[in-house]
Amino acid sequence: MDGEIGRFEFMSYTAVESSGNQPSNRVNTLYGSLPGKSWYRTMGFKEIAYTHGSTTESYRKTSAWLNRIRHQVTGGTPSRTMQDSSEREGTRVLNHLTQASEAILKTHGVIGNTLPAAVVASANESKPVHLAPDVVSAVIEQCGKTELIRQQMTANPIPYESPHHSLNISIDDVGVKRQRDQRPASVPETPTARKYAYQTVVHIENQLGSYRLNALGLTTMLTMLLAFLLHNDLLQGPIVFFADGQRSLHGAILTTFAGVSALQLILDWYHLHEKCKQLLSLACQGRRLRNTHLTHLAALLWHGLVDAALVYLEFIDPDHLKDTTAIDKLQGYLRRNKPHIPCYCVRKQLGLRNSSNRGEKANDLLVSSRQKHNGMSWSKTGSVALAALTALVSNQEATHWFRTGKLNFKLVPHPVK
């Protein structure tokens, strides 16, 4: 038995009836059978070793720390065992989330992540709550320098949701260095040879609370996310997705939530600005010209003037360019994402989000802070399992999970300030 008081062994006995019949092993009946030389682990061990150990420190440090506080200099829990048990627990969490999500979707009649007409109709019954037009108009008057700019800003089709009623969802992929299947040869590794293990992380938040999810792959994540929204009755209010410009991500979101009128997708400002910077760097003759055109282009996009930005790119002096192909790519990027580019300046003045930084922070909390240190590399299953264990702690579900083997799957209330 591996417990919070130490690692110890005990004998079990089997009672034989007078008739000679031997009943089933009572230990296996109570605790379940284990393969090989596995150890039973108490709830207290899991709370100490996982909640305060392997989710924050390396397995080696966690093992040494745990054995020290249990005064087990020898015969304690090895670091390799700590790793295996942590990843096994995280895999159990992911399997439970997958099974629970599938059960929720089945209950609501969802097949293949496609919402049935009845669920869509129910979600569209309540009208999405947006800010009053006069409030938005007053801010546009402050942000727009000319009447023409103010008219174009007003024509931007993306509405301004009420922050007190909206549900904000940030979704992004995060990758860590992937372990090799076998030890590398003596030849030094080239940067292009390094491969990564990716997973998808989602941060869900409204006025009541927040929740974080991770999964191996976008399809699995959208299944969990859709189940979470249905389970918590969150499809009615304004649902705002914040994401980068990845086409497959946009397509998957819009397909999954097709027909839900409360949905809107916003291109994260940081990713938009970085994309413009990257492609203008490829297109322009030098940094000075790049910065000049980036300043003008960013000002137009900050005000949501995508058409004006496209015209500006069209009439850049050819003498300033070394690669017109990059300009064509940038124009295609802006045209493709035009439905998701709002008036960022107005949203900022109204106190609305422009960024998926909550998702970036979730990436850091669940994955990067633990798994992105010098010398660390991970298997795909090991990385996503440890992140699931970290999410368990982040969502304040650890104690309930260790005691019952189930999750509440509910928003976690914000801490009282």
Image (tube, rainbow, N blue to C red):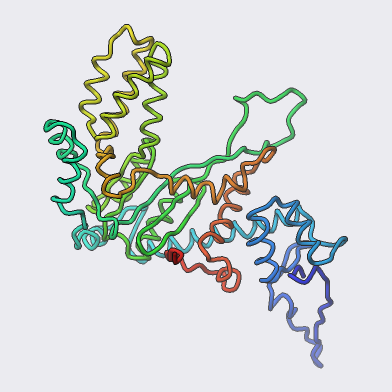
Residue 266 x, y percent position in the rendering? 31, 42
Q: In front: 13, or 247?
A: 247
Image x and y of residue 213, in percent: 48, 55
At x 62% / y 38%, what residue is drawn? 178
Whole-percent x, y for residue 400 in the image: 55, 71
Quarter where residue 333 is shown: top left
Which residue ends up furthest to the right in the rendered image?
Answer: 74
Image: 339 above or below 127: above
Residue at image point 65% right, 57% down: 88
Q: Residue at x 72, y 35 (%)?
A: 182
Give the image quarter of residue 39: bottom right
Quarter of the image with the C terminus is: bottom left
Residue 158, image quadrant: top left
Q: Nearer the viewer, residue 164 or 38?
A: 164
Q: 318 or 12, which is in the foreground?
A: 318
Q: Is residue 346 left or right of residue 169?
A: left
- On the picture, is 413 further left or further right than 333? right
Q: Is residue 338 above or below residue 401?
A: above
Instruction: Give the total of numbered labels.
Output: 0
Q: Is residue 267 above or below residue 43?
A: above
Report x, y in % for residue 106: 38, 63
Query: Quarter of the image containing the N terminus?
Result: bottom right
Q: Residue pushed farthest bottom? A: 18
Pick out the residue farthest to the top.
319
The residue drawn where x is 39% and y is 28% is 275
User: Is 270 displayed left or right of 84 in the figure?
Assistant: left
